[in-house]
Image (tube, rainbow, N blue to C red):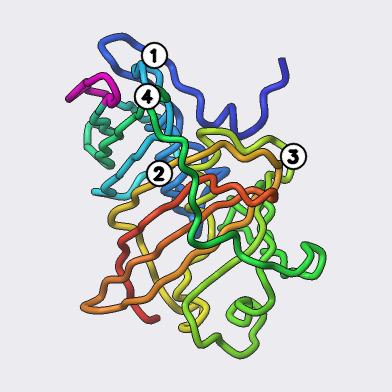
Amino acid sequence: MFVTLFDRDVMLEESGDARFGCVISDNWSVNGNPNGGYLMAMMAKAMVHLSDNKETPVITANYLARCVPGKAEIHVLEIARSRRFSRFEARLYQEGAEKIRALGTFVSDDHDSDLIRYETKAPELPPADACVPMPRLPQYTLFHHVDLRLDPACAGWLQGGPLADVSMNTGYFSFRDGRPIDFPALFLMIDAMPPAVMATQGMTAWVPTIELSVNVRNLPRTPRVRCSLRTRFITRGLLEADGELWDDEGNLAAISRQIAQFKKG
């Protein structure tokens, strides 16, 4: 069976006692740092492996220290269980030190609500071939494997043009090798958009993640998705970023909320 690069790089080896070995790859890095959504994808896989309920997970990760490419271990603990919800804690360790701690809630598909209501919709974008592709820079290996095409209206920061009035980045995402966007890939994709604050502040902004929460709603029906990332508040060296991921048929795939540090320059 053919194994894609992403499948290989999120593989887990169960070692018993709710522990999983993994190898953090340098293939999904941003400025030399493994992408937080990529790391969350492995932790989500570990938790869902132990969960009876697997629908619409909500996972929140706190990034305690920097991870580096190399071996790591994920420890999972079930902390609560009910008819509808299974809740887990996962911790990622490298060289004996805890690097990430995550809480995950997995929801049963046994529910009595058929209501589907969207009070917003997928971002309206120009055709993909009219959008601005992210360049394949050596330290940004994530974009060697993920094809991001930014809406020109928010891409001035990337092209040396005028900056936007609103801190928002929007665009299309897909895997360059055509891999479908499944459960673990959603965590990577929703955290792969460059920080929204760059639209107004330029590439000089430094925005390391403190906390990331992702809620998966539906698996995309299309191999390409649309993403928006919006920041509204920057105070006391902190900002929030709200993300949405939609498939090309207009179905909501995932939403996120990120808290990050902000430094200018």
Q: How many numbered discs, if any?
A: 4
Q: What secondary structure is found at the residue carrying circle 2?
A: strand
Give the vertical position of 237 relative to 47 (above or below).
below
Instruction: Name the kind of residue labelled 1 in the image.
Output: Glu
Label 2 CA crowd tier, 10 Å (few <14, some 14–19, many 20+) = many
Q: Horizontal and vertical percent for residue 36?
A: 41, 48
Instruction: Name the kind of residue labelled 4 in the image.
Output: Ser
Helix, strand or loop: magenta stretch: strand
Q: Residue furthest left?
A: 79
Assign the N terminus to one quadrant of the image: top right
Name the residue that disc number 3 marks. 177
Task: Tell whether label 4 touches label 3 (CB within 8 Å).
Answer: no
Determine whether, in the image, residue 225 is placed left or right of residue 79: right
Marked residue nearer the N-terminal end (4 or 1): 1
Name the residue that disc number 2 marks. 215
Measure the alpha-carbon separation of dots 3 and 4. Answer: 32 Å
Measure the alpha-carbon separation of dots 4 and 2. Answer: 14 Å
Measure the alpha-carbon separation of dots 1 and 3. Answer: 27 Å
Name the residue that disc number 4 marks. 108
Q: What secondary structure is found at the residue carrying circle 4?
A: loop
